Amino acid sequence: MRLTTKGRFAVTAMLDLALREANGPVTLAGISERQGISLSYLEQLFGKLRRAQLVDSVRGPGGGYTLARTVVEISVADIIVAVDEPVDATQCAGRENCHDNHRCMTHDLWTNLNLTIFDYLSKVSLASLVDGQRAKETSVVQDQRPQRRNGTCSEPLAGTV
């Protein structure tokens, strides 16, 4: 089972959008720059995300993309399905012709794994990814603050020894 860059990039771009849309529509150029994803590739992905009604486009100056639903209503599975990303551990894409045009002995195992993965991704909301990312960003900011001991900063003042 493998998730290709299409699915990974789509989830990453949607998370970037969700983190920034409070300030207005988010441009694909901005997502491209921040995430290192080709602008033309993002245009293809967002066309699919728009057709799946996960994002809305806003034209004109100050335009870009916004979420078409709340972050709670969008699951990772929704995003993966929208960009036609197959999550399939079988070698036959479910056609049951995996072993010399016959069903292999482990077909049910891989089919059940597919169902388990899809069920898991359905339960992971964009909101939970946003919360996780914001928590990481907050902890990084706190880790970068000078530590205080006894009411004074533990870092020496510039020019002092």
Image (tube, grey):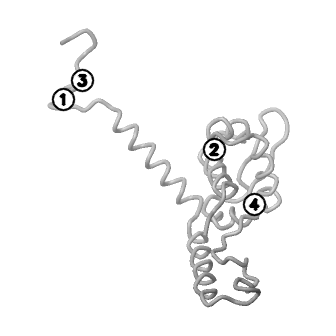
Q: Mark 1 against mark 4, which lies toward the viewer?
A: 4
> As displayed, is residue 155 above or below residue 66?
above
Name the disc covering residue 155, or none: 3
Q: Residue at x 69, y 39 (%)?
A: 32
On the image, the x and y values in percent for residue 101 come to 77, 86
Classify mark 4: residues with Cα within 10 Å, few (<14), some (14-19) or many (20+).
many
Q: Which is in the foreground here, disc 1 or disc 3?
A: 3
- Give the residue type that dot 1 points to: Gly
- Residue tagged 2: 22
| Dot placed on the residue nearer the N-terminal end, 3 or 2 | 2
Q: Amino acid at mark 2?
A: Ala
Cα gap from disc 1 to disc 4, whole angstroms? 53 Å
Can you give x and y, in whole percent of width and height, for residue 66 in the image? 72, 48
Q: Which residue is mark 4?
A: 83
Mark 1 vs 2, N-terminal side: 2
| Up-down relation of residue 3 to residue 155 (above or below) | below
Residue nearest the viewer, comparing 98 with 48: 98
Q: Nearer the viewer, mark 3 or mark 2?
A: 3
What is the crowding at mark 1: few (fewer than 14 residues within 10 Å), some, or many (at least 20)?
few
Q: Which residue is mark 1?
A: 151
